[in-house]
Image (cartoon, rainbow, N blue to C red):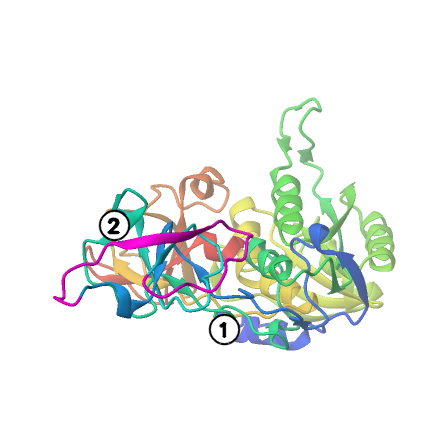
Amino acid sequence: MSESPLSVDVALANLLAAAMPISDHETCPAEAALGRVLSTPLVANVTVPPLDNSAMDGYALRLADWSDAAGLPAWLPISQRIAAGALGAELAPGTAARIFTGAPVPAGADCVVMQEDCEFNDGKVRLAATPKMGSHIRCAGEDIRAGQTVLEVGTRLGPAQLGVAASVGATELGVVRRLKAAMFFTGDEIVLPGQPLAPGRIYNSNRATLIALLTQLGIEVIDLGQVPDRLDATVAALERAAQAADVVITSGGVSVGEEDHVKAAVEQLGRIEMWKVAMKPGKPLVYGRVGNADFLGLPGNPVSAFVVFCLFVRPFLLRRMGAEFQPTAGFTVPAGFDWTKPGKRREFLRARLEDGWAMLYPNQGSGVLTSLAWADGLVDIEAGASVENGDRVRFIPLSELLK
């Protein structure tokens, strides 16, 4: 293990290479599958839509019947009315069918004209504009064909994916077992909200943040609570966590201070494979193995813990869950600030887009959690770079890092 900090890109590549997808699968009711990862491809056994149907409320007709011998709009008698869910009869030549959105287009009709473009009088209809062949008709199978794979293995099931599953009638889905993540916290200075706040103490914000981040990913959280700043207590908590979970996550105690025991505990029970990333905030990031569990040690400062989770831990966990992971590219925007303090580490600055410009939160300290609540993204500045107002900078939306 190198003592020199790794670059952000190398650290992420190493983590992803170490992330082995869990192999346990199970069947889950589709209505309870939000956030789960598909382990079996979903193949449609129906065609969607099953029949040609109308995309509008209006009138179905033959294009050849729309005008009379003089080429003027013809008055067509309405021969039938077709509501959604009903099947109409074959359309008689020289007539039109009153039709509603979603209703099957009758045989013989080759276009639908929306009602706003029609004139109705005494049981007959004529058109105000020339229709087009196939207009406002949704063709059978234009969405899904029977036998088509509609969701691939590794798909993380969100609302749209569950809608697709429902559209082909799926009631159960083959999914990867939920990943289990155990976490505990070190630091005698932190207490839980609701407890007395003695002088020199602070409330534990990282616990709330990490539970929310893990829960949002669909991970089963095992919260082992607060651990005293002693090596024996840290070793005992780490051993218990590694036996209970697939991944152990801690916050704090991964530096080299006399009261930072997490790194030493990991080295006592297992091994460390990665330590320190050349980034700010969040230099101390530990990856290792304890028994059969992965270990991820996050910094203790709340902004550092959040940013490290989003940039490294989230991709690692998604890979462990068996989900497809695509790095977030972000996009460039003009900087509405000057950054004249180039450093040796790659910087991720809390920012917000205002009229298309990236504006920085005024205090970029790693303990200023309100900066994340204010921000809607991170500005990515390479090590050694400076920025002048108006320069193009890479902006990474937080929405992309939290989904």
Q: Give residue 177's position: percent from left, percent from top.
A: 78, 62
Could you say which is closer to the camera, residue 149 or residue 247?
A: 149
Q: Does residue 207 belong to the magenta stretch?
A: no
The secondary structure that dominates the magenta segment is loop
Helix, strand or loop at label 2? It is strand
How dense is the environment of label 1, judged by Cα within 10 Å: few (below 14), some, or many (20 and up)? few
Q: Residue at x 72, y 60 (%)?
A: 263
Q: Amino acid at mark 1?
A: Asp
Could you tell me which quadrant the C terminus lies in? bottom right
Q: Which residue is mark 2?
A: 118
Q: Residue at x 86, y 57 (%)?
A: 239
Looking at the image, which residue is at 40% across and 57% down? 55
> Residue 272: image x %, image y %?
72, 69
Write down the quadrant of residue 163 in the picture. Answer: bottom right
The 10 Å Cα crowd at callout 2, few under 14, some 14 to 19, many 20 or more, is some
Q: Secondary structure at mark 1?
A: helix
x and y, in percent, of residue 296 in the image? 68, 61
Whether residues under marks 1 and 2 lie with C-beta atoms below 8 angstroms apart, the answer is: no
Q: How far apart are the two marked residues, 1 and 2, measured between alpha carbons?
A: 61 Å
Instruction: Determine if residue 243 is in view.
Output: yes
Q: Which residue is mark 1?
A: 9
Asked if 363 appears above or below 135 in the picture, the reply is: above
Observer able to see residue 338: no
Look at the image and give the residue range highlighted in magenta. 69-94
Residue at image point 63% right, 54% down: 217
Q: Is residue 187 above or below residue 326?
A: above
